[in-house]
Image: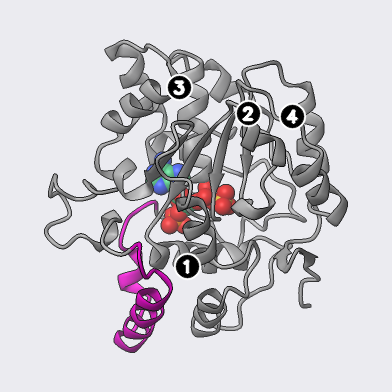
Amino acid sequence: MAAQYIQYKGIKFPPGYNSVENLSFAENDFEVRDDDTFIVTYPKSGTVWMIEILSLILSGGNPVWNQSVLNSSRAPWFTTQLGLKAAHKLPSPRLLTCHLPIQIFPRTFFSSKAQVVYTLRDPRDVLVSYYHFSKMCLPFENPKSFHCFLESFLSGDVPFGSWFDHVTGWMKLKGKSNLLFISYDELKQDLYGIVERLCHFLGKNLDEAAITSVVENTSFEAMRRNDMCNSTMLPKEFMDQEKGTFLRKGVCGDWKTHFTVAQSEYFDRVYQEKMLGLKGIFPWEQTGPENNSERGVNF
Ligand code: PPS
């Protein structure tokens, strides 16, 4: 049966946890605190990874919080009813998570000192990850085929809207001191270095042993073992674990095993058109070997 998506300001949201009232509250009434840190992403870009990393940084590298409290309680999805309750209960400094595009982000953020870590990923890998996720996450429409999903993704007709609009919208704030842009590709390439960059951004002094603990406890394998973040605790009516694994592959470039040459060319044409003005700055656009230290330098 086709999912009945919620519509809010021209964007569709999966039913169940989302409602127009909660989205409107998040945009217009949510009280941002100056010491809040928001984890913002387009879906499938590394949200849950960033929650683990930032939770561990806040804990000074001690994994107990990550291993004993669900990620949704450590960094609540404040745009949902349950998440909002959890957010209100959290002591400061809070971690908060959402997939909101910039135009419906909490208004009070823009006059606050709160910080945003925006994580983004090669959109072709986002698309592949989103396709598999949509098959196992029940509030999402089950894609008819990979090609149908690609068409929907490119036209922005997917939950949380267009990847292109989301990224270009948030990138307009690039340069502001309370925003940090991190790519999934950089996390894969140099997790230690990115943890250092995040510590600096958040004003947290972690020694080498603490940073090493953050890195070790946020590896793909460690996260797969941790029930507090691997999504196996989610109710069956939300996620059907028999249809897939949330922490699926955790690699860059999986799109190459899914796209045909024609689909890749089609994707590139749309990408060139939509990303005008922002081209050439993202790690996945850099040519050269995967481990080239120059990758992502402009980002
Ligand atoms: S969601 O549903 O939007 O919150 O999903 P999100 O967390 O943004 O993205 C899920 C993808 O991130 C991968 N992931 C990781 N990759 C590498 N290392 C670590 N530690 C890690 N944690 C999460 C996860 O496997 C999903 O990507 P795919 O490509 O589907 O494996």
Q: Position of residue 165 (x, y in %)?
A: 53, 64
Where is residue 33, by image quadrant?
top right
Q: Which mark is first along the chain, 3 or 4?
A: 4
Which is more foreground, mark 3 or mark 2? 2
Residue type at numbered disc 1: Leu
Q: Name the outermost residue toward the front.
A: 111
In whole angstroms, how far apart are the C-alphas of marks 2 and 4? 17 Å
The residue where tag 1 is placed is 127
Q: Which mark is first along the chain, 1 or 4?
A: 4
Q: Give SS at disc 1.
A: helix
Which is more foreground, mark 1 or mark 3? 3
Q: Is residue 147 visible?
A: yes
105 with respect to 117 (left or right): right
Q: Position of residue 86 (x, y in %)?
A: 77, 29
The residue where tag 2 is placed is 112
Instruction: Specify the quadrant that holds the N terminus.
Output: bottom right
Q: Position of residue 24 (x, y in %)?
A: 82, 50
Q: Which residues are magenta?
A: 250-278
Compared to 203, does 281 lie above or below? below
The residue where tag 3 is placed is 202
Which is more foreground, mark 4 or mark 3? 3
Q: Which mark is first along the chain, 2 or 1?
A: 2
- Report the predominant secondary structure element of the magenta stretch: helix
Label 4 with label 1: CB-CB less than 8 Å: no
Q: Residue at x 78, y 66 (%)?
A: 7
The residue where tag 4 is placed is 87
Q: Which mark is first along the chain, 3 or 1?
A: 1
Which is more foreground, mark 4 or mark 1? 4
Front position in the image: 98 or 212: 98
Where is residue 233, by image quadrant?
top right
